Structures are given as structure tokens and as C-alpha cells.
Image (cartoon, rainbow, N blue to C red):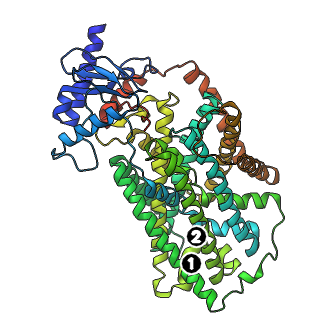
Amino acid sequence: MRRRRSRRRRMGARTIARLTGSETCDDHVIIQSSALFPERMVQHVTALPIGGAEQPHHSLFKDTGVSDSGTTTPTSNGDDGSRSRSNSDDATSSNPRNDGMERNVSTPNDALHLERRVGLVSGVALIVGTMIGSGIFVSPSTLLVKTKSPGLFLVIWAACGILSTLGALSYAELGTMITESGAEYAYYRHAFGSLPAFIFSWVCTLVLKPSQLAIICLAFAKYTVEAFVSECEPPIFIIQILCVAIIGLITFINCFSVKLATKVQNVFTAAKLVAIAIIIAGGLYMIGIGNTQYLSQGFEGSTTSFGDIATAFYSGLWAYDGWNNLNYVTEELKNPFVNLPRSIMIGIPLTTVCYVLVNVAYLAVLSPTEMMQSEAVAVTFGTRALGALAWLMPLAVCISCFGSANGTLFVGGRLCYVASREGHLVDVLSYVHIRRLTPSPALLFNSAVALMMIIPGDIASLIDFFSFTAWIFYGAAMLALIVMRFTKKDAPRPYKVPIIIPVIVLIISVYLVIGPIVDNPKIEYLYATLFILAGFFLYIPFVYYKKVLPGMSYITTFMQLLLEVAPSTAMAED
């Protein structure tokens, strides 16, 4: 039996060596022992010399270095491992396959993990770029229908920004206390244990993050097609085909290189801020020439419905969603104790100011009735205010949606990756490309689920479903912070918020979850609740009792060879 297992390991190692085509991989290759054995929970990284004896394995959760004598020595903070990895990169930089956005191969005794490549500018771009997406162009009309007055409309836009800021400040404390990627997943695991963390990963990887990506890409496709079809409703089939293409392009960018993905995010965030500045300038010009008749209506006819206000918050908060996205990539953030709070304090107030001024600009040009009847408010605004430059608005919307979709997939893949690394999803989703150091299996999985969600093509129902489930977990994160104030009193907190802030966000979260159900019960809310509860019945056999579906080890091996990926470890602390 041992000979058979050893033979299979050597065959898999040779296959990876042939796939990568590098000299280093002719000598060593990293595989996971659990990929060739049914016991999936045995997670170790093993270096196998081709045709030689098996080397000692190394724990996934500690970096290792190689001493001068060739023996393996543990490192306390990952510095030695980082230096050896850098030296390997320098030594092989002349390889023609190296395009500057990847490292060549994994080296012996070198544990794979995602590297810290996100700085302050990229952090701000990730927050602003994912917050400013399709929401500001899709949601205004929906929100105005619910509020029924310009005054309440603007108040709720500002209130959504304040609520997002309060929630993000609470997340800044959580992120600097628990410096693990995965955001809510990591916080639930530390505060409540494994079961709530698994339920969150179950819902988020199969519903929340893919639905966000699907919504944004549908908006991108809708605005793009409408630019060419002005006299009739664009065919839903064409919109869906374009949506599939854009998801495929974004997936390729994120799988190819982390550097490329962050550069794309930075460029598109800057472009969308320019577009927003054009809208604001156009609106201020109209106000300057005295076009204030719609703004002067104030709070006339405002709704008093409990459910309508909650639903209006849903639409507004969808536009603000993304304020917690940087917490999903904490392990890849440079100096997270400083850059995480700074990015939040720069990004969210900037977005709030942009949103309020954009909606003031809309009301300076369009009447409330025209906004409610328009499904493309930004395009209608451009036609009225920009004249010959009206074509800039559809282009601006597409740019904004593309950047937001890129950031959404970037963080969505990290959650899937972290949950799999902890044993809550299938093993292969925690693997990393051996040269590009991207979590490509997790990214591909997230995109595949999003592709299935574009089939209905209804953005409004997706927004309602997303918002209902999302605020359940936002509220639970606030509860986790409050709980850990008592259970982890001595834990280091580089940044700490007054306890009243998470309490306020928790109360509002409860209102946003219960309000629409009481006022207007929908079958979608029941589906969402049942889907959340279904996670409990999956947790017992597959996580608690560690049961494995037959054939999973062979599927894992096949995917490992196909995608050129290998097991990873957690990021070492700086």
C-alpha cells in the first residue's frame, strides 16, 4: 500500500512539473497530502523530490525556513520565509515566463500564501471602488418611489452614509484586533465558534457575494446595451450574454495577477470619481442659474410607512455596500493596524459626500416624477444637462460598474479561500496558484455561482434578497464586537470605538431585517431564512463529523493539476 501511495504521489508531482515547465519543479513540487488520501482534514504541505525520498512535512499555519545545513527551522514571524522567497524571485527574474506579475515556482520548504500587496491607496480604491458601483445609478428611482419626497430622499441618502460609517468604524476595531482575512467569518469564529462562521460562509459564498457580482454586471450590461438600443427595450438575452462576457473578463484579471487586479481597481476608481465630478458640476451649474423648483418641494408628501422607510434604506444601503470589503483582505493589507482605519476614514466619508451631491444634482435637473419613471437616471440626467456630451453618462456607468465588479470578485474570492482553509468548504478552494499566488479556484467558484444568478435578470428582486440577508450578518458582527469586549478584554486593540456605536448599528440592523417582513411579507424572505438554516444541517455531517463525499480526493487532485494550484497557509504576521 505504501509503495502504491508513493507511486501516485510521484506521478502527480511529475504531472505538475510538466504543467509548469520549470527547472525548479523538475526537482520539487508542493502538493497536499490530503489531496491523495480520503482524510481531507489532514492539512500539511509536503515537498516531494522527484524519484527520491519524501521530505518532512510542514504545518500549514507556520512559515518555515531552510538553514545553511539544509535542515528545516521554524520562523517566528515569517521574515526568513519572506526573504527566501524574495531571493528565489530575484534569482529567477531572468526567466522569460516571468511577466513581472508572478513568481516563477514554489520552492522546497516554501509555504504558499497570499502576499501583502495592498497599500493605503489601493485600500481606499477598494472601498470607494466597490461602494460606488451600479447603486447610485440604479437605486435613486427605487428609493424615491418609497420616500415620495425629495427632502426625505436626501435625508435617507445621508443617513445611509452615516450608518455605513458607524458600521465601518466598528469593523476597524474588529479588523485591527483580529488580523485575519474573511471579515465576518473570522469575527464569528472568534466570538461565537465554528457553527456561526460556517453558516455565514455557506450563505455568503453561495448567495451574498455572487449576487453582488451578478447585480453589478447586469447593470453594466443593461446600460451598455441601452446605449445602442434607444427606441425599444433591449433584449434580455443580449444583456445576459454581455453579462457573462464581463464576468469572464473580470475573473481572468483576478486569476492572472493580484497586482493587475489592484491596478485595474485604482484606475477605474479614479475614472468613476471624474464621472461623478462631471455630474455634480452639471447639477451645481443648474442650481446656479436658478433651477431649484424640485429641490424646494422639501418633505411634501413624505411616506410614513414603517416598511417603506426600511425598504428605502435597503436601496440606499445597497449603493453604500462595500464599506466592509477591506476587512476581507486584511492578510494582504500592508501595515493593517494603520492602513485599515485610515482607508475607512478616507473612503466612506468621500463616498457619502459624492452620493448626496450627485442626488442633489439629479433633482436640480429632473423632477421627482421623471426620476421615478426612469430606470437609467444618470443617462436621463446626461441627456438633459450635458447636451452633446450626454454619451459620457452611459460610459461613466459602465466604468463604474466594471470597477465595482472587479473589487467585488476580489474580496468574494478571499472569503471563499479563507473558509476553505479552515475546513469549512472543499479543500481545493483554499489552493493558490504556484506562480501567480492568486486564489484562482475560489475566484472561479465565485464567478460560476454569479453566472447562475444572472438567468432571472431581475435586478430589483436580487437587491431585496441581498439586503435582507446581508443585514442579518452585519448585525451579528456588531454583536460579536460587543461580546468580545467581555470575553476578550485583554486582547490588543490598536483602534477602539465607543461601545455605543456597535449598539446603534445593531439596533438599526434588527429594524432593517424585521421592518419589511412585518410591513409587507414576501416569500423571498422565507426562502432566505430557510437557506440560512440549511447551513446547520450541512455543518453537522461535513464539518463536525468530518464526513467526505466519495471521490472528492480524486476531484481535488484533478483540479490541482488542471489549475496548477497548491495548498496554502495563513499569512505570517509582520
Report x, y in % for residue 400. 48, 65
Whether 475 is drawn above or below 533: the answer is: below
262 lies left or right of 65: right
Answer few, some or many: residues within 10 Å of disc 2's Cα (few below 14, many 20 plus, some between 14 and 19).
some
Secondary structure state at the residue bearing disc 2:
helix
Front in this rendered view, residue 464 or 240: 464
Q: Which mark is residue 280?
A: 1
147 lies left or right of 400: right
Q: How many marks?
A: 2
Report which residue position mark 2 lands on: 354
At 66% from the left and 70% from the top, the residue drawn is: 141
Which residue in the rendered view is the most extreme toward the bottom?
289
Q: Which mark is residue 340?
A: none
Q: Quadrant of residue 304?
A: bottom right
Whether 99 is drawn above or below 547: the answer is: below
Front in this rendered view, residue 91 or 11: 91
Identify residue type, mark 2.
Answer: Cys
443 lies left or right of 509: left
Front in this rendered view, residue 363 or 557: 363
Identify residue type, mark 1.
Answer: Ile
Front in this rendered view, residue 526 or 50: 50
Label 1 and label 2: CA atoms lie apart by 8 Å
